[in-house]
Every structure is written in C-alpha cells, then in structure tokens.
Image (cartoon, rainbow, N blue to C red):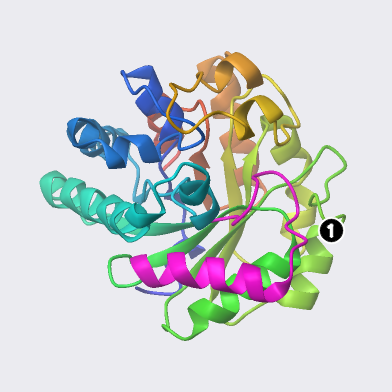
Amino acid sequence: MNKDFFKKLKILDGGMGQELHAHGLVSKGTLWSTSAILDEKYHKLIVNTHLKYIDAGAEVIVTNNFSSRRIRMEQNKVNHMFEYANKKACELALEAKEKSKKNILVAGSVPAQHDSYREDTRDKKIIYKAFSDQINCIKDYVDFFYLDVISSGREIAIASEIIEKFNKPVLVGVHLLKNGKLPSGETINELFVKYKSSNWIGVISSCVSMEIAENSIDDFKTLNVPFGFKVNLWGDDEPSPNPKINKAKFNEDAVNLNTIMGKREVSEDMFLKLGKKFIKNGATILGGCCETNPRHIEILSKLK
C-alpha cells in the first residue's frame, strides 16, 4: 500500500454493526456484530453490506471484527471461536472486494481491547497480549490497520509497537469527548508528540458526534498529517460504557444499541456541510461509524 494514500481525499465506509441490525441481525450477549460472523446465515448480509458501501463510493472498507476482541469472546463463552471470528471477518471483506471488481482497500479493525469509549488502565502486558492476539489473526488479510475507537495514547502506542513488526501502515482512530480530549485526558497534540510512529498514515476522530468532530478540526490541522473523521449518529453526544450492554447474558438476545444510545436523524445537507467544512480545512479522510449507512457515504462521495 502507498503510504501517501490519504494525502488525497478518500472516502471510508460507514457503520457495520448497526447497519446489520437494521437489516435483520439479532445479536447475542455483548457480541454485537460478531454474532453475524459466528452465525453463517448472516454471512451474505455482511458481504452485501460491504458491497453497498463500495457501491456508495467507499474506497476503504473495514473488517467486521470490532467486537471479536478477546475479552468479548471470553465474556460470551465463545473464546474457542476467537481466531475463526477475526479471520472470517477478513475473508468476508475480501469476498466483497472481489465481487465489487473495484480497487478498494481493506482496513483491519483493531479496537480497544476492553470497553469502548473508556481508557484501558490495565497492566501493559495484558493489553499487549490482547492486541497482539487480534492483530496476528488479521495481519495477512488486510492492506492496513485501523486503530478503531481508541481512548488513550498508551493503547495506541502499544498497538503501533506490535504492528511495526509487520511493516504495514496504521490509520489511527481516536475517540474524543466534548472537551476535545481523549477519555484518557490527553489532547490530540499531546498524543501526536508523545506517541507518533513512522507507520501512521493518518489520524481521525473515531465514533464521535458531528459536533465533536467539527470542534476538533483546528487541533487536527496542527498535526500536518492526513486527518478526518468517522462520525457516529448516536443520540448520545458522549457515549460511555453502559451496564445494560456490558452485562448482557451471552446466551440471550441483545437489545439494539440504539434503544440505549438513541439515534440521531440528520439531513443530507447537514452531513454534506460537515464534509465540506473538513475538506475546506484540509481533511482528506471522510467516513461514518455507528448508525451511519450507505446513504451517508454516498453523500460524502459527492465531494470527490
């Protein structure tokens, strides 16, 4: 992969887990979108969802293994399926790429290894092992790695250290709060100065509201690297780990997350304005996260 890939405007895909739920997925426990990997009847839906994003203009699709982190698999008594879940997510993304006959890239999702939206303060050895297990499963399938909704510089540094061994690029996705900082309390600039690695090809705000993304523009501009967003459309501007989600029983049907987080309806014009403002300020990486769908990516692709 050309490390200058994101120096020109590129469109990423949108949300996967919530889009699968919108089209029939019933997930189990805390597995969320991984339920669709473990149940073969949903494999066609995963491939078709990737294809819809490609048809909408996405030039990068992200593997559907966000919830296939070790801790989630253990919580749900399916740890024996860990390797299968991560590799199958990659295989289904590659199947969609082949069917599309388009020269898109496949990004390997590397999520936070504990709860989303919260700093992982566990011992480094534990975090390193968790990241290493997942990265090793997907490394041979993907064009680059996407650090997916990460909440601290320390976690980004640990994951980047592991990935450096494989000589593959990294797109860093940082989660931000309303105050413009990561949940760890670090600023974007502090993160960049302290942890920047030579294999980073861009830094984006990851699974944040449109407002938080917009308010972060000036901070990203100072980094002098490709930047942009993957915004969510949750109703909650500042989501946090929720007991109702994290304590769901592994053998029971889970509720749709938007019944807890809420869901925001935005006009095409609002979404287009956000993309235009980012591009005007030099952004080159635009995409969506939870509750965005192929229509939102089609809107962003009009800016190409």
Q: Is residue 113 above or below residue 270?
A: below
> Which residue does the image show at 44% across and 64% down from the upper left?
134
> Which residue does the image show at 28% across and 33% down from the upper left?
49
Residue annotated with mark 1: 187
> Which region is colored magenta?
111-138
> Which residue does the image show at 16% across and 50% down from the upper left?
95
Circle 1 residues within 10 Å: few <14, some 14–19, many ≥20: some
Q: In this rendering, does residue 223 appear at all?
A: no
Q: Position of residue 123 (x, y in %)?
A: 74, 70
- Quadrant, the N terminus: bottom left
Q: Position of residue 227 (x, y in %)?
A: 61, 56
- Total residue callouts: 1
Quadrant of residue 128 within the rendered picture: bottom right
Q: Is residue 179 above or below residue 137?
A: above
> Which residue does the image show at 17% across and 34% down from the upper left?
44
Q: Position of residue 66 (x, y in %)?
A: 47, 47
Quadrant of residue 56 within the rendered picture: top left
Q: In this rendering, does residue 62 appear at all?
A: yes
Q: Is residue 257 left or right of residue 217?
A: left
Say whether residue 252 is magenta.
no
Q: Is residue 302 left or right of residue 278?
A: left
* Amino acid found under the numbered disc labelled 1: Thr
Quadrant of residue 15 within the rendered picture: top left
